[in-house]
Amino acid sequence: MSHLALYTFGVLKTPLADPAPLTREFYDIGGAVYRKISQHPGYLAHAEAADGDRGALFEADWGAWGEFAVPTWYGKGRRAETTALAATLSLWTDLRPAFDAIYTGQHREALNRRYDWFERTGNPNYVFWWVSDDAIPTWRVGVSRLEHLHDHGSTPHAFTFHHAFAPDGTPTRSQGIGPKSDRVRCSTPD
């Protein structure tokens, strides 16, 4: 049996250490969203730093999830006081539970506000791929898959909700899965 890995990446308008109300709001909403998603059916696990420090992404001990990494297009800071990004790495049982968790409830409300917090980079902001049920994806693999999606569009190696693949590599489309805005333009999903 396979599990679905999900890597998300966004470039924030301000550093995580910025004391401005909008940054604090992002932190607060993000914490609530993570708590809710971790209780969602089909959710298996997500990368967490051993020390729990959200601002020290590059220096943190991520255990089996590996050393923290970012796509080549990220050009902002890498120290705790200058880092301006949000990234997640998680495991799911299948596409449907991941879709339901992401596009309903608190996470959907946060997605509706994403341009308050994130820059519009023109690069993909998430990618899926299948892993064996005993595998834990690493940050480096997540970055590699996101960059592959950017360069080649959806393939069995790296895909989106809208252009998904089953574990055996065949295209798949579950009824109602795939946001209408998940267009591929210049091999890059919005």
Image: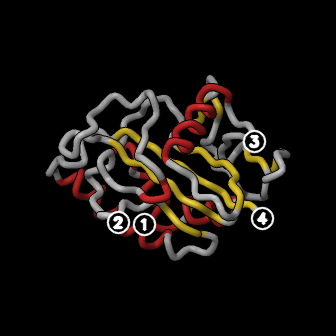
Q: Are marks 2 and 4 in contact (CB under 8 Å)?
A: no
The label on residue 156 is 3
Q: Provide residue 116's location: percent of width, then percent of height.
A: 33, 45
Q: Residues within 10 Å of mark 3 (few under 14, many from 20)?
A: some
Q: Provide residue 101's location: percent of width, then percent of height.
A: 56, 65
11 to 96, vertically: above or below = above
Lateral position of residue 60 relative to residue 101, left or right: left
The residue positioned 17% from the left and 47% from the top of the image is 18
Q: Earlier in the sequence, mark 4 or mark 3?
A: 4
Q: Nearer the viewer, mark 2 or mark 4?
A: 4
The label on residue 106 is none
Q: Nearer the viewer, mark 1 or mark 3?
A: 3
- Viewer-proximal residue, 11 or 131? 131
Q: Earlier in the sequence, mark 1 or mark 3?
A: 1
Residue linked to disc 4: 1
Q: Residues within 10 Å of mark 1 (few under 14, many from 20)?
A: some
Secondary structure state at the residue bearing disc 4:
loop
